[in-house]
Image: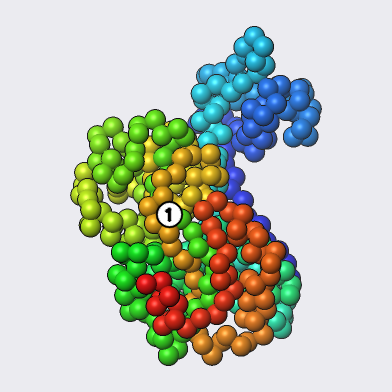
């Protein structure tokens, strides 16, 4: 099976001038940040010193500011402008990667059909998460073709109900908001038609800047005027959970600066905070760890795939379950910050799964 990879790419230009391709520039800046040396950085990214130096000068001419600074005994470091460029690239990747991954998966499936691939393609619609990404990364697409679309939990489960996908990834919090969340998804799931497979347990909470300089400890602190908040998109399971928590304990949404913002992944929220554009957001511990941010746990939850009962014994589905039950995958999940692999790969009825969480 053909493997398709689509990656973000961006350019910067001034009207009438040739655009500056950021790919080489950003790789060079990241390496300078790590090594403190232009010469070492150029070598590590496969550029000649002369080309690297010219690239830096061209970029500084374009921006009208320096990208590098030197200090006695500290080598070469990035200026605030260069740091903003690096963080902009990380934010772009965090925001767009799930969408691009979904597009690549769709293209793979289409090319596979054109090549008369006889293996049935599993269609997976899923809320974005690190355990799902780890699972997808370990699948041999030749042996198990998979068409993945990242979307909100509600959209994924609704697609399963319409038979537009074979697996729908969604998450249920433990504790006081569990019953309301289950009721929301049971509008779309039928215990006589659908069952669940456990994917992972994970922690959701407040992601805050490294060192928590504003001393944020509870949701109430989000209403403080100096706190800038970054939210997930409307319809996501994480935003739905936040709305429940705010309705129960406050503060009111309109008191939170940035409540109406919308990032589409946990990583994008974390990247936004790490870049200094927000002070707090809602997301997973794993996303906070990815960007070396602080994390304040609020709730534990379980991530599931929902599927039709009559599809559970299909060869492609059984192959996926075997991968999920593999100890190697369990180790990958357990190594993710805030995750656990208790019951991963276990097939359960809806009634049993939800009653076990009470």
User: For residue 177, what is the image quadrant?
Assistant: bottom left
| Left or right, residue 297 beside residue 292 | left
| Coordinates of residue 293 in the picture (x, y in percent) | 49, 39
Q: How many labels, in total? A: 1
Q: Measured along the vertical axis of the image, is residue 149 above or below residue 91?
A: below
Name the quarter where the C terminus is drawn: bottom left
Task: In this rendered view, identify the residue nearer to me: 339 or 27.
Answer: 339
Name the quarter where the N terminus is drawn: bottom right
Q: Residue at x 53, y 65 (%)?
A: 200
Task: In this rendered view, identify the residue nearer to me: 358 or 98.
Answer: 358
Badge 1 density bin: few <14, some 14–19, many ≥20, Cα 10 Å: many
Under circle 1, the secondary element is strand
| Coordinates of residue 98 in the picture (x, y in percent) | 54, 57
* Residue 9 visible here: yes
Q: Measured along the vertical axis of the image, is residue 167 above or below residue 220?
A: below
Task: In this rendered view, identify the residue nearer to me: 182 or 167.
Answer: 182
| Left or right, residue 143 beside residue 70 | right
Q: Residue at x 56, y 34 (%)?
A: 86
| Coordinates of residue 17 in the picture (x, y in percent) | 56, 29
Q: Residue at x 39, y 30 (%)?
A: 213
| Left or right, residue 164 beside residue 334 | left
Q: Residue at x 70, y 26 (%)?
A: 35
| Coordinates of residue 56 in the picture (x, y in percent) | 65, 23
Q: Which residue is mark 1?
A: 204
Spot the residue most to the top: 72
Q: Measured along the vertical axis of the image, is residue 145 above or below residue 232?
A: below
Task: In this rendered view, identify the residue nearer to me: 62 or 238.
Answer: 238
């Amino acid at each position: 099976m053909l493997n398709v990879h689509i990656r973000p790419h961006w350019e910067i230009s001034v009207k009438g001038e040739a655009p500056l391709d950021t790919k080489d520039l950003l790789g060079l800046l990241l390496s300078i940040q790590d090594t403190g040396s232009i010469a070492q950085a150029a070598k590590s990214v496969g550029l000649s010193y002369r080309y690297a130096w010219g690239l830096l000068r061209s970029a500084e001419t374009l921006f009208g500011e320096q990208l590098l600074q030197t200090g006695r005994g500290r080598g070469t470091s990035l200026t605030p402008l260069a740091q903003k460029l690096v963080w902009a690239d990380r934010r772009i990747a965090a925001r767009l990667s799930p969408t691009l991954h979904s597009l690549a998966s769709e293209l793979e499936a289409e090319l596979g059909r054109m090549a008369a691939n006889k293996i049935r393609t599993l269609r997976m619609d899923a809320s974005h998460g690190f355990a799902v990404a780890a699972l997808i990364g370990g699948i041999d697409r030749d042996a198990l073709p998979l068409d993945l679309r990242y979307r909100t939990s509600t959209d994924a489960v609704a697609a399963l109900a319409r038979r537009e996908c074979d697996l729908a990834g969604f998450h249920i919090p433990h504790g006081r908001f569990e019953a309301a969340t289950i009721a929301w998804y049971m509008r779309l799931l039928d215990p006589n038609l659908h069952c669940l497979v456990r994917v992972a347990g994970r922690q959701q909470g407040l992601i805050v800047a490294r060192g928590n300089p504003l001393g944020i400890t509870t949701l109430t602190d989000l209403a403080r005027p100096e706190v800038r908040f970054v939210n997930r998109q409307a319809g996501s399971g994480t935003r739905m959970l936040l709305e429940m928590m705010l309705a129960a304990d406050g503060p009111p949404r309109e008191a939170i600066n940035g409540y109406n913002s919308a990032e589409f992944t946990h990583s994008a929220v974390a990247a936004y905070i790490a870049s200094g554009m927000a002070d707090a957001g809602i997301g997973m511990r794993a996303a906070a760890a990815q960007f070396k941010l602080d994390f304040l746990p609020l709730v534990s939850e379980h991530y599931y795939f929902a599927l039709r009962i009559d599809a559970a014994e299909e060869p492609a589905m059984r192959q996926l379950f075997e991968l999920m039950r593999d100890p190697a995958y369990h180790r990958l999940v357990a190594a993710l910050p805030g995750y656990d692999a208790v019951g991963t790969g276990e097939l359960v009825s809806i009634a049993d799964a939800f009653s076990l969480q009470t």
